[in-house]
Image (cartoon, rainbow, N blue to C red):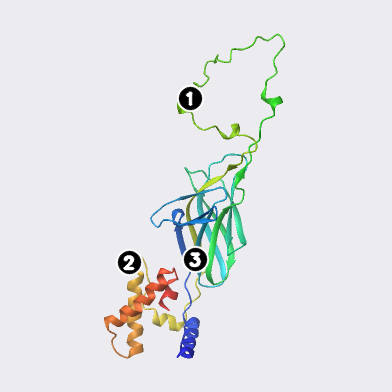
Amino acid sequence: MEKYLVIVDDVLDRAIRPGQMLVQRTGAQLDALIDNQIVPGKEDGAERIIVGATQLLTTFPAPVDGLYTIRVRAASERVDREPLRLAVRVGTSAIAGEVRITANPKQPGSYTVSCKIPAGKTNLALIVANPLIQPKAQPKSQAKEAQPKDAQPKDPKARKPGDPQPADKKSASPAPMAELPADVPVPRSAIIYAVEVTGPPAAQASELQRRLFVAMPDKDLPKREAARRIAETFARRAYRRPPSSEEIEVLLKVFELADSQEEVFSESVK
């Protein structure tokens, strides 16, 4: 029996060719690695903020070997001359590419990295390549303005017209970056709105696949209903009789299991 199933699986692999993979995640759906602890993402969330050495993680099933495109929609507040550099890691160690996040939160940008990925379950991580800013202390020689010897001392409390009002001590905001000590690093941060992974173009369907796949999902036909039509057609030929609703439901449970693991439609049906 086991040998028979292996043969059938091999025949199906050659006959049914996977379609193009498209996996989409919102930023909030990504897991976060913070201080070596995994913080799970939220299914109903939107964006997620990556700060300093924090990593955002996800996995996806790559149906075939080939060139994949990873698209990240993100933004970052510019805090110094160097923009935040976001690295994309595929697998356990390989950095697939790096992008500079120059868009601000009012107008998020889309950034892409393309790389070759082998078939199988794939880990994806977003990492800030330059996570920290080291503030530079202003030299004391430049901090004090030179004054003529005969200059009269100025009243420190006196303000010129147009000077900003002094902050209320009770409601004063935290000190800006420039006032931090030189040895205190400041973490960079970015807002990740979405991640999209697109696989290689689908191979041309075989003649057997065209006969078996009597329906394909689209905006008007849900995946489960398309799978039902395919299962009914296949079962009628395999059983040489009309299949019962219970038999079709068993087949659909197998489809739903594969579909929940984000397999492409043709792989889930197979």
In the picture of the structure, the residue carrying the numbered disc 1 is 169
Secondary structure of the residue carrying tag 3 is strand
Q: CA distance from mark 3 to mark 1?
A: 51 Å
Q: How far across and down, in percent of the image, does residue 104 sit?
A: 51, 43
Secondary structure of the residue carrying tag 2 is loop
Question: Label 3: few (<14), some or many (≥20) within 10 Å?
Answer: some
Question: Label 1: few (<14), some or many (≥20) within 10 Å?
Answer: few
Q: How far across and down, in percent of the image, does residue 1 sit?
A: 45, 91
Q: Is residue 239 above or below residue 136?
A: below
Mark nearer the N terminus (1 vs 2): 1
Q: Nearer the viewer, residue 253 or 266?
A: 253
Q: Is residue 166 above or below residue 242?
A: above
Secondary structure of the residue carrying tag 1 is helix
Q: Nearer the viewer, residue 140 or 242?
A: 140
In the picture of the structure, the residue carrying the numbered disc 2 is 220
Q: CA distance from mark 3 to mark 2?
A: 26 Å
Front position among marks 3 and 1:
1
Front position among marks 1 and 2:
1
Q: CA distance from mark 1 to mark 2?
A: 61 Å
Q: Are marks 1 and 2 in contact (CB under 8 Å)?
A: no
Q: Amino acid at mark 1?
A: Lys
In the picture of the structure, the residue carrying the numbered disc 3 is 60
Q: Amino acid at mark 3?
A: Phe
Mark nearer the N terminus (3 vs 1): 3
Q: Quadrant of the C terminus?
A: bottom left
The residue sitting at 34% across, 83% down in the picture is 233
Q: Amino acid at mark 2?
A: Asp
Q: Are marks 3 and 2 in contact (CB under 8 Å)?
A: no
